[in-house]
Image: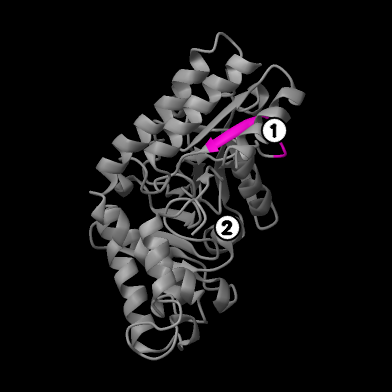
Amino acid sequence: MQARLYNFNPGPAALPLSVLEEVRDTTVEFGGRGISIMEMSHRSAPVEALAATAEQLLLELMELPSGYRVLFMGGGASMQFAMLPLNLLAEGATADYILSGSFSEKAVQEARFIGQTRIAGSTKAIHWRQVPDVGNIAIPSDSAYVHITTNNTIEGSRFNAIPQTGSVPLIADMTSDLLSRRIDYRQFDMIYAGAQKNIGPAGITAVILSEELLARCSKQIPLIWRYATYASNDSLYNTPPVHSLYVLERMLQWTKQQGGIGHLEERNRAKAALLYSVIDGSGGFYKGMIDPEHRSDMNVTWRLPSEELERQFVLEAEQRGFVGLAGHRSVGGLRASVYNAVPAAACEALAAFMQAFMGRH
């Protein structure tokens, strides 16, 4: 096999080599049944068992008690931007959104097509260098729900404190940090995440929600958009992305084998620290895009003195086997996404390359 690249793509992102090899070996035939799982009916016993195991594993890793369900569906987290208000933003009610980056803006944009929204907090005026101070955000008791994006993939920031919303449901988009750090997931009434960062491949989304919230969802929308439909059919109401579900289940097993969230958080913190230490010690050659106390351990972002030099950085990096380091087209700069499956050796190699590039330029 050709030597594998150092993969810092933001999503679809790196998957563990052991998981990829296992998936490769079962692509043609799954479980001794003579066909691939991609060819099996989603009503078959292996696929039903796969969905049940994945749900149980995810709840176990998140240390959630009974009273929560996991739903698997397509459409990505972007579909949840609309599906959430369809289910929970009733006519005459208002939902509160805390804005900390581009994807939280997209979430509220979709909600505005469906009902009334309110911006509870925003740091757009300072170009997202920080996340809002949740301690200074007041949420009306009659709010339909509060929405937060816990980690900002594009900008490279994250919330280290979670808003206290009382009896108002708290909803989180955790696409880029689910299972990456210790969080008391019981604080949330619903969490959703596109799988393609930390828990699987593109094409499948996990929605974790309390049964209490599930009971409050609208019954006036088409069945295909109801969370209750997916819950009552154990995520198999219609044909799910079966192969993506299989890889997701393998990823959850891998996460458990690594020692769970606690061990991964320690590794993630150390990986990100390698890169931030080069940025902070560069004398201004590299400049972080996020104020230090708000930085993400998943998405490390920085700038160089000129866009020309940034293009040169990406070019030289690609020549040396690094991929995915260009910043998002909306903000520019550079970004290294160091999700759970990115090995420490990749971050060590990138830190050394950054030092060498600085020496040359």
Q: Which amino acid lies under the numbered mark 1 shown in the image of this protein?
A: Val
Residue 334 is a magenta residue: yes
Left or right for 58, reference 102: left
Of 114 and 345, which appears nearest the observer?
345
Quadrant the C terminus occupies? top right
Q: Amino acid at mark 2?
A: Pro
| Residue 96 percent location from the top left of the image | 55, 43
Say whether residue 171 is left or right of residue 326. left
Q: Is residue 282 visible?
A: yes
> Left or right: where does residue 361 sit relative to residue 183?
right
Image quarter of residue 100? top right
Disc 1 on helix, strand or loop? loop
- Which residue is disc 1 drawn over? 331
Q: Looking at the image, which residue sits at the far right?
A: 308
Relative to residue 191, is residue 42 depicted above or below? below
Between the residue at mark 1 and the residue at mark 2, the CA separation in whole angstroms equals 28 Å
Q: Please name whichever residue, 282 or 265, is drawn nearer the observer in this view of the structure.
A: 282
Placement of 75 over or under 177, stated as above or below: below
Determine whether, in the image, residue 248 is placed left or right of residue 355: left
Between label 1 and label 2, give the one nearer the viewer: 1
**Residue 128 counted in the magenta span:** no
Tag 2 residue: 85
In the image shown, does 163 or 126 lie closer to the viewer?
A: 126
Count numbered badges in the picture. Answer: 2
- Image location (x, y in percent) of residue 43: 42, 88
Q: Does 360 sit above or below residue 256?
A: above
Q: Which residues are magenta?
A: 329-336
Cβ–Cβ under 8 Å for marks 1 and 2: no
Considering the numbered disc 2 on the image, is that residue within a helix, a strand or a loop? helix
